[in-house]
Amino acid sequence: MYLSPCFLANLGLSDTLKIADIVGIPLPWPQATPPAGWLKCNGQAFDKNAFPKLAQVYPGGVLPDLRGEFIRGWDDGRGVDSNRSLLSLQGDAIRNITGFVSGVYVGFDAYTGAFYDTGSRNSIAPASAVVAQMNDDFAFDASRVVPTANENRPRNIAFSYIVRAA
């Protein structure tokens, strides 16, 4: 991998990046087993005496568990994802999905988005001598307008995250 001398100088590194310089940085790895001298980011504790440089990055002696997780850039005051601290976990969320239902009588209905007509009809008893009416039943199903799964996620490809242990 080539890194320009200017880029490395901005990081306080020489024009030769040494493997020891990246201790603690999670790297995607395309195999299930990390190479010698590397550990999986699977929430495991490590020996801080055996890996003092790694302990400088993770002083608690525990690696982050990145299995099945996406790494998100820290907001650091930008205001996009405020009130977060480094290495904090964030639960899933989905943007609100809405639809519209108009009219409750058979033949006078309209719906959009995730709403659909179930085809079920219910009789509405009149309050007076007025003729009884039928109303439609509507349901909400987000899968009609967005891809769905048992989790929220962007498109992705699976890698193991590993860190250099030193």
Image: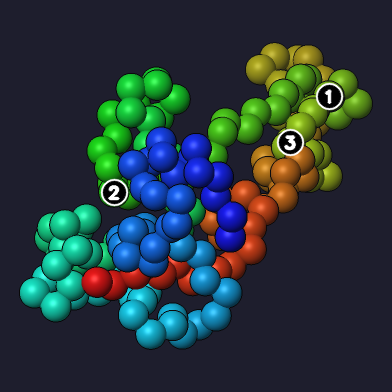
**Which of pointers 2 and 3 lies earlier in the amino acid sequence?**
2
Tag 3 residue:
115
Q: Name the residue under label 1.
A: 110
Q: Residue at x 50, y 37 (%)?
A: 6
Q: Residue 87 carries which label?
A: 2
Between the C-alphas of marks 1 and 3, the distance is 10 Å
Quadrant where the image shows the C terminus: bottom left
The residue under the point 28% across, 72% down is 165
Query: Residue 15, image x and y in percent?
Result: 46, 50
- Residue ranking furthest to the left: 49
Q: Nearer the viewer, residue 65 or 140?
A: 65
Which residue is pictured at 32% across the width and 65% down the height?
20
Residue 41 in view in this figure: no
Secondary structure beneath label 3: strand
Q: Is residue 117 left or right of residue 65?
A: right
- What separation in Å lies between label 2 and label 3 (alpha carbons)? 39 Å
Which SS class for mark 2?
A: loop
Q: Which amino acid does label 2 sit on?
A: Leu
Which tag, 2 or 1, sits closer to the chain's start?
2
Q: Residues within 10 Å of mark 1 (few under 14, many from 20)?
A: few
Query: Which tag is nearer the camera, tag 2 or tag 1?
Result: 2
Indicate whether 135 appears above or below 92.
above
Colouring scheme, one of rainbow, by chain, secondary structure, one colour: rainbow
| Tag nearer the camera, 2 or 3 | 2
How far, Cα to Cα, is label 2 from label 1? Answer: 47 Å
Residue 121 lies in quadrant? top right
Name above or below for residue 44 compared with residue 12: below
Give residue 101's position: percent from left, percent from top.
73, 24
Q: Where is residue 112 in the image (x, y as percent from the top left)?
A: 79, 28
Residue type indicated by callout 1: Ala
